[in-house]
Image (cartoon, helix red, strand yellow):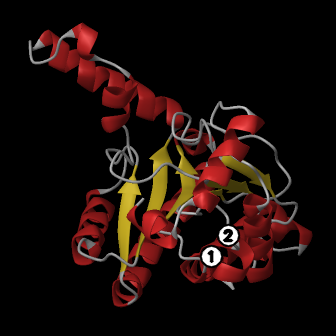
Amino acid sequence: MAENLAGDSAQPLRHVAVIMDGNNRWAKARGLPGHEGHIAGAERVRDLVESCRRHRVEVVTLFAFSSENWQRPALEVTGLMSLFSSYIKKEAKALNEQGVRLRVIGERSRFSSRLQKRIADAEALTADNREMTLVLAVDYGGRWDIVNTTRKLAQQAVDGGLAVDDIDETLFEQNLCLNDLPIPDLCIRTAGEQRISNFLLWQLAYSELYFAECYWPDFDVAAFDAAAVAYYQRQRRFGCSQEQMEADVTERELESPRDRARA
C-alpha cells in the first residue's frame, strides 16, 4: 500500500506530526461526557501508529497536551493527566514489542513525580528500538521550545563557552526538541480547524499541512491514507522555483539505479 501510494515520489514521508483535535466535540455529538472523547482519541493512536508503519514512516509526533491546555477546567486537566499516565503504563510494553521507541517532549516539571518516573521508565524500556519513533508532545508549546533553546544558548554565551557570532540557524535547531530527528514532512490536524496552535513552530516551517474535517476519534486508516495521497501529490519547493524542482527531478530520472542508491 505504501509503495503504491508513494509511487516514484522524490519526497519520502519520514516524519508525520499530528494535532489531534475534536475529542470533546466528538463526545458532545454523541451525548457523551468529554472524557469519553479523550478515551476514544487515545485508542485511535494505535491505528495511527499501524498506518504509519505501513507507510514506512520513521517518526510520528502527536500533540497530546499543549502548554495552554492547563487553562482548561481543572477536572478535565486531571482527567487528561490520568489518561496520559494510563496510556504510558498500558502501551509501553506493546510499543516495545513492536520495536517502537517512545519519546516525550515538553516541560515535565508540572507533572507528578509518579508520572515523571513512568515516562522515564517507558523511554528507557524502548530506547534501543529502531522500527519507529513515537513522540508525545505533552505540556509542550512551540514558543516554549524556542524560548527554552534561547535560554540555553544565552547561558552558554554568558559562561564563555559560546560566542554570539557562532549562533546561527543550524546551532539553534540543534538545541530544539526533536533535534536528532528528521523535521516533519507532513502535519495533520483534524476537526476542520486550520491553524497549528503553537505546535512545533520552528520545525513546521516547510512542512506540508493537511486539514481533515473529521474529529480525531474518527480519523481511521482510510483517513490517513487520504492524507498520505494528498502529500505525495504535492511538490515541495523549499524556497526554490518550480523550474528548479523540475530540473532536479529530471536529473534524478537520468541517474542510474546505482547512483540513486548511493544518494
Viewer-closest of 138 and 128: 128
Q: Residue at 80% across / 62% down in the picture? A: 230
Q: Amino acid at mark 2?
A: Asp
Residue 225 location in percent, x, y?
75, 75
Horizontally, is 164 left or right of 156 in the view? Answer: right
Q: Residue at 18% across / 13% down in the picture? A: 157
Element marked by disc 2: loop
* Residue at the spot of label 2: 8
Horizontally, is 96 left or right of 192 in the view? Answer: left
Q: Residue at 45% across / 76% down in the picture? A: 86
Mark 2 or mark 1: which is in front? 2
Residue 40 location in percent, x, y?
69, 77
Relative to 124, does residue 242 appear above or below in the rendering?
A: above
Q: Can residue 75 be seen at all in this image of the molecule?
A: no
Residue 112 location in percent, x, y?
32, 56
Q: Can residue 34 be seen at all in this image of the molecule?
A: yes
Q: Hey, which quadrant is residue 68 in on the image?
A: top right
Q: Residue at 56% across / 64% down in the picture? A: 79
Viewer-closest of 41 and 45: 45
Q: Amino acid at mark 1?
A: Leu
* Residue at the spot of label 1: 48
Viewer-closest of 115 and 10: 10
Q: Hey, which quadrant is residue 30 in on the image?
A: bottom right
Viewer-closest of 154 and 239: 239
> Which label is found at residue 201?
none
